[in-house]
């Protein structure tokens, strides 16, 4: 975990938590990522989203629609050989603007925390996304 120290007016040091990830993440630095996933949100259907980063405990996404924090979601990723799925919940959602995005008004960054009851499945999902990120960067 990353801790940040900040001073107040009296010179006292205050420690704030600025990183809540439970595992190391791999960032997808490609501007036009072709790492696409299907995001299923309850009965509201599905949306195609882009992977921004991934760890063994969760994934960061770029989406065109906001999702309420705490909402259960189902993710599906096709790695070419098979479809890998994970369940989780939205832990944060923030509107972003990006001049390179084709849709007016930008996009939303979403944080998804995977269900922790199946560490093996979380690791498999992480490795599949990580392999695609590394392949695309190479």
Image (tube, grey):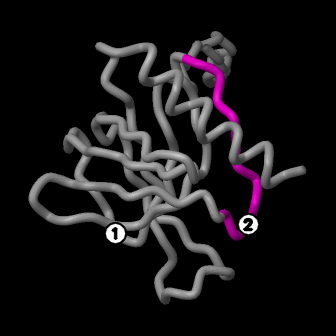
Q: Residue furthest right?
A: 138
Q: In this view, does 71 lie above or below 78?
A: above
Expressed as whole percent of the image width and height from the top left, the position of residue 116 reads 34, 16
Q: Name the residue under label 1.
A: 65
Expressed as whole percent of the image width and height from the top left, the position of residue 97 reads 56, 73
Q: Foreground residue, 74 or 79?
A: 79
Q: Is residue 94 above or below residue 60?
A: below
- In space, the residues marked 1 and 2 are separated at their CA atoms by 19 Å
The residue stretch that appears in magenta: 23-33
User: In the image, 37: left or right of 100?
Assistant: left
| Residue 72 falls in image quadrant | top left
User: In the image, 88: left or right of 127?
Assistant: left
User: In the image, 20: left or right of 89?
Assistant: right
Secondary element at tag 1? loop
User: In the image, 55: left or right of 88?
Assistant: right
Expressed as whole percent of the image width and height from the top left, the position of residue 136 reads 79, 54
Q: Foreground residue, 79 or 106?
A: 79
Secondary element at tag 2? loop
Q: In this view, does 42 lie above or below 100?
A: above
| Magenta-span inclusion, residue 37 | no
Q: How many callouts does the rendering have? A: 2
Q: Mark 2 points at which residue?
A: 31
Q: Which residue is drawn at 65% across and 18% down?
A: 2
Q: Residue at x 43, y 46 (%)?
A: 83
Query: Which of the two labelled residues, at mark 1 and mark 2, occupies the earlier sequence position?
Result: 2
């Amino acid at each position: 975990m990353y801790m940040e120290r900040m001073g107040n007016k009296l010179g006292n040091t205050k420690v704030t938590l600025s990183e809540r990830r439970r595992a190391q993440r791999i960032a997808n630095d490609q501007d036009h990522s072709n790492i696409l996933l299907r995001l299923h949100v309850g009965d509201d259907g599905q949306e195609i989203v882009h992977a921004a980063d991934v760890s063994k405990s969760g994934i960061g996404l770029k989406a065109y629609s906001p999702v309420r924090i705490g909402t259960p979601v189902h993710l599906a990723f096709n790695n070419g050989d098979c479809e890998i799925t994970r369940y989780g919940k939205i832990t944060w959602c923030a509107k972003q603007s990006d001049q390179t995005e084709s849709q007016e008004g930008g996009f939303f960054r979403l944080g998804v925390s995977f269900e922790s009851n199946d560490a093996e499945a979380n690791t498999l999902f992480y490795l599949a996304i990580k392999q695609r990120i590394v392949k695309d960067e190479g």
